[in-house]
Amino acid sequence: MNLDCQHIIHPFQEDPGVSQRERSRSVLVKDPPKIDGRTLADLLDYFVQLAPHVNYYDSGLNTSDWQPFFKKSKPFVLAGISTFNSPEK
């Protein structure tokens, strides 16, 4: 008995979504899961708060921190303003 294996179709070969390219992106991107409840402004403000605790080394290997970088960056300044909680009266 001579079997012609070239005409045998693998059971998963024709299933949509078997390979990464065949998966429907709209299904995957429809509602991406949120890792936590923070907004982009909250995360940017978090980086500003973290800046004094991370060393910055200049070309002469002098040590400082990242606060000057964040003070000159408009997105980080605006994020700080938007996340500022004023004391209630």
Image (cartoon, helix red, strand yellow):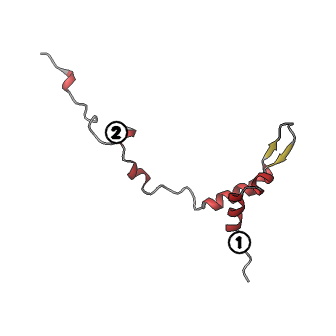
Whether residue 83 can be seen here: no
Please name the amino acid that badge 1 sits on: Asn
Callout 2: helix, strand or loop? loop
Separation (CA) of disc 2 from disc 1:
49 Å
Image quadrant where residue 11 sits? top left
Q: Which mark is residue 85?
A: 1
Q: Is residue 79 left or right of residue 54?
A: left
The numbered mark, 2 or 1, whose residue comes first in the sequence reads 2
Q: Nearer the viewer, residue 22 or 74?
A: 74
At a point 67% along the width and 67% down the height, the residue shown is: 82
User: In the rendered image of this protein, does residue 42 appear above or below residue 23?
Assistant: below
Whether residue 18 can be seen here: yes
Q: At which x and y percent is residue 6?
A: 21, 23
Please name the amino acid that badge 2 sits on: Val
Q: Nearer the viewer, residue 44 or 89?
A: 44
Considering the image in quadrants, where does the C terminus appear? Answer: bottom right
Residue that label 2 marks: 18
Q: Which mark is residue 3?
A: none
